[in-house]
Image (cartoon, helix red, strand yellow):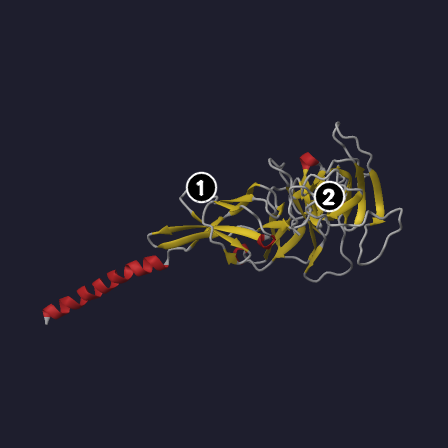
Amino acid sequence: MMLSALTKPLSLSVSVLSLLPQLIVSEVPTSTSYRAVVEIVSGDSRIFSGERLSLRCIIPDPYQASWGYLWFRGSVQLPQTGEIFQLWNANVKESGKYSCQGKKETDVGSIKTLRSLPYEIHVDGGFAILQLAKRSVLVGDALDLKCRLRGNAPVHQTILYRDGIQVMVQSGSSLNFHLPHVTLEDEGRYSCRVSWDLSRRTHSVMSVPTLVNILEVLAKPVLEIDKDNAQLGRNKMNLICHVQYNAPAPAPPVNYYFYKNNNLLGPATSLNHMHVNTAAGWYSCRAKVPKLDIVRWSEPRSFGEVTGPPLMPPHPHHRNQMTSRSPVHTFSAPETQPASPKYFASTPSFNQRTESPSPSEAPDPTSLPTSDRLPGQTQTPEPQGVSWGLF
């Protein structure tokens, strides 16, 4: 009887110990908080078919652990497993959004990083491509574009279009366009047309449109009122000022101000949130970059029972972020190649499927060159005087 009584606790202890490894394993995470990053190593995001490019997968691991790599095009996993992904002889079908993910094997199983944001690659089977010097351009910066032509044709004219509207015409062999001090109005889908004479004929090809994004250095803030956060305590709510800040590193700091009924709720803070007492009223926030003299206000938001229209915030002086149309663009040609650019505000581009422009404004009709026209190529087809009121 005593032996039996001693055996039961012993067997129970053995059973519990045998379960410990399973309990430990089940709590081991299968993913990390690291997000992989894709960067281009060589080539361009827009290339001709038959060309090559290389992408690299970066794992921001401070411990510099050894990782393996998974590559994807869209949702499809690709066979490549190295840090560098290469397209040696790109095919049009290989266009798509590429992403990568880190993976490593441990004693408790596989651990993966978060998949990177997609990097879009466009493989063009035509004869002209419009490439961007930078994927994103800030308001006030210059926009540089290059119209690449397959082959070495004797180019005599290049035209730049935005959303089908002719923007610039330049004569000569230069294929580069320079638009200084761009504004939000300059955002759109750009394309280029290249023309040359060969064998007593004028030939012309046009690129596929390329989207150009123009970003404000400091975007308009959006105020969020969080009243359901259990950590705030009773009769408290959190004001959060969301803002997109696109200044290049090292970026000057942003100061945040919060208002209720246009009354400042406290001094400037580097934090984009503030805890306040729950009370009805119109709330807004302001983001300011003192070193850049840029101020942006959010739209007022109501909380609780308020009457009357929204209280609009005052508009103090601040640097113009150039959200209106910029001056006429100028073209800087290389010293070795004189150019006589012409500028157009609203001349429609030629579209064979919709209308035929007048002879004075129509570009040369498009004719896709054959291999004998391009030798060696194969045809591939802040406010003032405010009071602080903590309500």
Q: Is residue 217 visible?
A: no
**What percent of the width, then of the height, locates residue 280?**
68, 58
User: Which kind of residue does numbered mark 2 sit on?
Assistant: Val
**What percent of the width, then of the height, locates residue 290?**
68, 36
Q: Secondary structure at mark 1?
A: loop
Disc 1 versus disc 2: distance between alpha carbons? 46 Å
Q: Secondary structure at mark 2?
A: loop
What residue is shown at x 80% (from left), y 44% (from top)?
Answer: 201
136 relative to 198 in the view: left or right: left
Residue 62: numbered disc? 1
In the figure, 146 relative to 227: above or below? Answer: above
What residue is shown at x 33% (from left), y 52% (from top)?
Answer: 107
In the figure, 9 relative to 256: above or below? Answer: below
Foreground residue, 163 or 91?
91
Crowding at dot 2, Cα within 10 Å, few <14 / some 14-19 / many 20+, comes out as: few
Foreground residue, 210 or 38?
210
**What percent of the width, then of the height, locates residue 150?**
67, 43
User: Which kind of residue does numbered mark 1 sit on?
Assistant: Pro
Foreground residue, 171 or 213?
171
109 relative to 381 in the view: left or right: left
| Labels 1 and 2: the sequence-earlier one | 1
What residue is shown at x 52% (from left), y 46% (from top)?
Answer: 86
Q: Which residue is mark 2?
A: 386
Foreground residue, 114 or 371?
371
Crowding at dot 1, Cα within 10 Å, few <14 / some 14-19 / many 20+, comes out as: few
Residue 354: name its quadrant.
Answer: bottom right
**What percent of the width, then of the height, locates residue 125?**
65, 50
The residue furthest bottom is: 1
Q: How many marks?
A: 2
